[in-house]
Amino acid sequence: MTAVSSRISVRRARVLGVLFLAFGAFTAVFFGGRAEGGQDAVFGLGPNVPALTLPVRATMYALALLMVFLGGVQLFRGFGRRTYVVLGVVVGIFVIGSLAYAARGKSLNFTSLLNSTLLRSVPLTFGAMSGVLCERSGVINIAIEGMFLSAAFTGALVGSVSGSLIVGLIGGVLVGGLMGWFLAVLSIRYRVDQIVAGTVINIFALGITSFLSARILQANQALNNPGRFQVVDPPLLGDIPVVGPVLFRNNLFVYLMFGAVFTLSIALFRTRWGLRVRAVGEHPLAADTLGIKVLFERYRSVVLGGMMAGVGGAFFTLGSVGRFDEGMTAGRGFIALAAMIFGRWSPWGAFGAALIFGFADTLQTRLAILDVGIPSEFLLMAPYLATILVVAGVVGRARPPAADGKPYAKEG
């Protein structure tokens, strides 16, 4: 077994080395070769901050040389435990090169790019938090997409009827919790295969929201006009150079996201409740022996996870576009699931992964606007391609909770 694992590690190291070289070659040939001499890329960093100007061709060749060097070291020597850190560095360098090439002869607002990244990561983060809560207790949750759709529809409808965005948000959260309860009943009480149960919920949510949207919302547009939460700009904080516009000029959902990540991280790893949740997800029999109510803990965690996904779903309508459209989540629930795996079932790790996927989503939009010469179909694939790479194991194998996906039957 050790020999097999060693061969896999060596093969993965070589594949990554070739990948680094490919990134470098592409940057030199496509970006550097197509850039004209004397062209500069200007990155705006916000008001009262001097813009950053880079000579495009020289920057491309310098970045390509650095990536080729790292690829050569990876092939012939390797970076050991730092391999995936270097992978992140290479991807970051490639992204910088892409942005510099896209902005050649133009100006790119870098703070706006970061702010958009943060916004696009909001539903992914809440979806990943939902997955963390469920799977830490031992229940696989692939129903995040269905929870997103249900909460988005409910948020728009309830917000429109009540005339209150807060009431709409509460409605979305409650429906997300209801979908979580449905998943819990199927998975915990009836011991339905959890993948099948999640798939059923996703199909049901897509069908019911599409049907109700066609029958109710399209017939009466007043029921699909809830508005959206406005930007909250705290005094002084929003004026901090670079950081202020990114972190402190956002709507309510961004602040809820930071609060959820911070709170869940402490609750899972610093409280008795978190210890019980992790115990029933790792070794439910031992937890039951110690007097922990395994089924109750799983029910509670899955319902809370559904409510967390409900906040993410409500973002699509109340925090983003201000209306509901059929299938508007566009597979973001599955990307959130990948973010949870990438983040190794931890709140902060999932948040970091959500930022990466959010950046990939933002990047394809900005590159399309700047007309970089890459077909739009390839640009649209960026966030989904990043998801496939993560799930395929480019970032290494991650160990889920030991009892994840395993039904528990109380003995005696």
Image: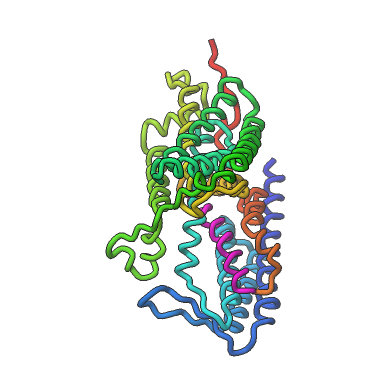
Give the dominant element type of the magenta stretch: helix, strand or loop.
Answer: helix
- What is the x, y in percent for residue 42? 50, 80
Viewer-nearest residue: 8 or 138:
138
Residue 245 appears at what percent x and percent y? 39, 65
Quarter of the image where the N terminus is located: top right
> Can see residue 350?
no
Outermost residue toward the front in this view: 219
Query: In the rendered structure, which segment of residues is drawn in magenta?
Result: 349-371
Between residues 290 and 300, which one lies in front from this camera angle? 300
Check residue 359 for magenta coloring: yes
Instruction: Please determine whether, in this image, residue 197 is positioned above or below residue 9.
Output: above
Q: Is residue 155 magenta?
A: no
Instruction: Name the spot of residue 29 as percent of width and height, x first.
Output: 70, 77
Residue 57 position in % (x across, y down) = 61, 83
Check the image and name the residue furthest to the left: 235
- The residue that appears at 64% across and 74% down in the rendered structure is 372
**Residue lying at 62% horizontally and 57% vertically, measured from the top left:** 383
Name the image quarter holding residue 377: bottom right
**Based on the displayed image, in which of its 4 quarters is residue 333 positioned?**
top right
Left or right position of 290 against 85: left
Q: Is residue 321 left or right of residue 377?
A: left
Tell me if 390 is positioned left or right of 317 in this view: right
Establish if 14 lies above or below 411: below
Q: Residue at x 48, y 31 (%)?
A: 303
Q: Is residue 143 something that shows in the picture?
A: yes
